[in-house]
Image (cartoon, helix red, strand yellow):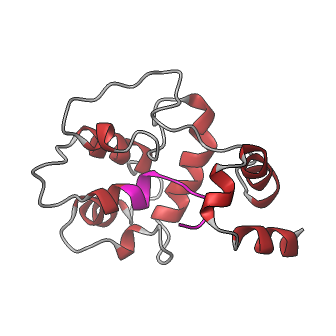
Amino acid sequence: MNKACEIALKKEKTHFSSNSKYENDMWNYCSVFIVKPVTIENSKKKEKYEENTFGVEKTHNFISTQDLRNEFFWRVRNEEFFSESGDKSGNTATANSFFKSFYDDNKNKPDNRSNIKDQCEAAYKKSSTWNNDLTLANVKQYCSFDVIPA
């Protein structure tokens, strides 16, 4: 199975978008999540964010913080974020940024720390047009998920 997933993951991303059954199989067999996390756009909760905020920018990419089907995703993302290394680790965030400050404030409080889900919700509410400590790339790094490489 590992070999099949490795081959499948090397395919062009356009192959997945034109074949949703193939993408569903990828989530089912090649991802720990089994089903694709629910985005803001596809959530039954119909999250609402003000104009010019990150929550409106990429509703098809950002994972819903309110849809209960995403609880496992957010638990895993929290572990990734508070690990010391990895591309989803808050330790790799730009100094003095929205996510780096959050990481530094909470990394030594494993039993009593805020979680990345709440920080992503706060990010979704922040202005996307005038923001010095938060970028679209940062929000995508910590608040979205894609089993298929870009």
Relative side of 125 to 80, left or right: left
Vertical side of 133 occupied by 33: above or below = above
Q: Residue at x 86, y 76 (%)?
A: 3
x and y percent of residue 13 in the render?
61, 62
Range of magenta residues: 140-150
Q: Specify the quadrant that holds the N terminus.
A: bottom right
Q: Is 143 included in the stretch rendered in magenta?
A: yes
Q: Residue at x 64, y 68 (%)?
A: 12
x and y percent of residue 25 in the render?
80, 50
Of 106 and 70, the residue lying toward us? 70
Vertical side of 82 occupied by 60: above or below = above
Vertical side of 136 occupied by 96: above or below = below
Relative side of 129 to 138, left or right: left
Q: Residue at x 57, y 57 (%)?
A: 146
Of 95 and 125, the residue lying toward us? 125
User: In terms of image quadrants, where is residue 142?
Assistant: bottom left
x and y percent of residue 34 in the render?
75, 47
